[in-house]
Amino acid sequence: MDWVVFWSGYISNMIRVENQNFLYFLHEEDKFDCSSLSALCQYLAKLETISLGQVKDLYFIREQILKHLVDHVGSKDLYTIFDLPSDYWEYLDHMGLEIKKLSVRLEQTLEVKN
């Protein structure tokens, strides 16, 4: 499978909250789906290269996840996030760590080109 096509489809689906990815479950079903977030982190850990636009997309997705959690964890909220594990921050930290690793790799690539 072509990496660029896969990335473009996967991330654009996540940004548009489509195709039952983690953001879809969180936004549409109010479900913290650990397996889909873990799958995303595992995928990110395997990436060897990334573009600036792709890193920006990942930071946007992480920001949307955090906003959704902040908006729906309050005691006065009408919605409840189902299957929210007590260690949910560990999942988010793992995602943040993988994004940070990719960002550092991108910085190193840009330094070599300059």
Image (cartoon, grey):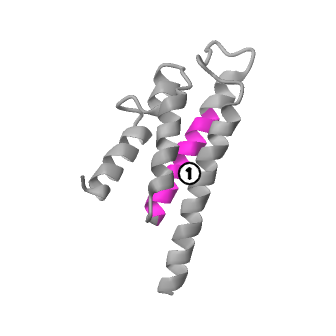
Q: Farthest residue in the bottom direction?
A: 114
Residue under the image location 57 percent in, 44 percent down: 62
Q: Is residue 51 above or below residue 110?
A: above
Q: 79 or 96: which is nearer to us?
A: 96
Q: Quadrant of residue 53?
A: bottom left
Question: Where residue 47 appears, x then y in whole percent?
Answer: 44, 58
The residue singled out by tag 1 in the image is: 59
Q: 8 or 44: which is nearer to us?
A: 44
Question: Where residue 52 appears, x then y in whole percent?
Answer: 47, 65
Check disc 1: other Cα within 10 Å, few if <14, some if 14-19, many if 20+. Answer: some
Q: Is residue 21 above or below residue 9?
A: above
Residue under the image location 46 percent in, 55 percent down: 46
Decide if residue 64 is on the left or right side of residue 17: right
Q: Is residue 109 above or below residue 1?
A: below
Residue under the image location 75 percent in, 15 percent down: 75
Q: Which residues are magenta?
A: 52-67
54 in the magenta segment: yes
Q: Is residue 108 above or below residue 39?
A: below
- Label 1, secondary structure: give it: helix
Question: Where residue 25 appears, x then y in whole percent?
Answer: 47, 25
Decide if residue 49 is on the left or right side of residue 105: left
Q: Main secondary structure of the magenta part?
A: helix
Q: 39 or 16: which is nearer to us?
A: 39
Q: In the rendered structure, which amino acid carries the disc numbered 1?
A: Tyr
Decide if residue 99 is on the left or right side of residue 52: right
Q: Farthest residue in the right direction?
A: 75
6 in the magenta segment: no
Residue under the image location 50 percent in, 76 percent down: 109
Question: Where residue 6 appears, x then y in whole percent?
Answer: 30, 50
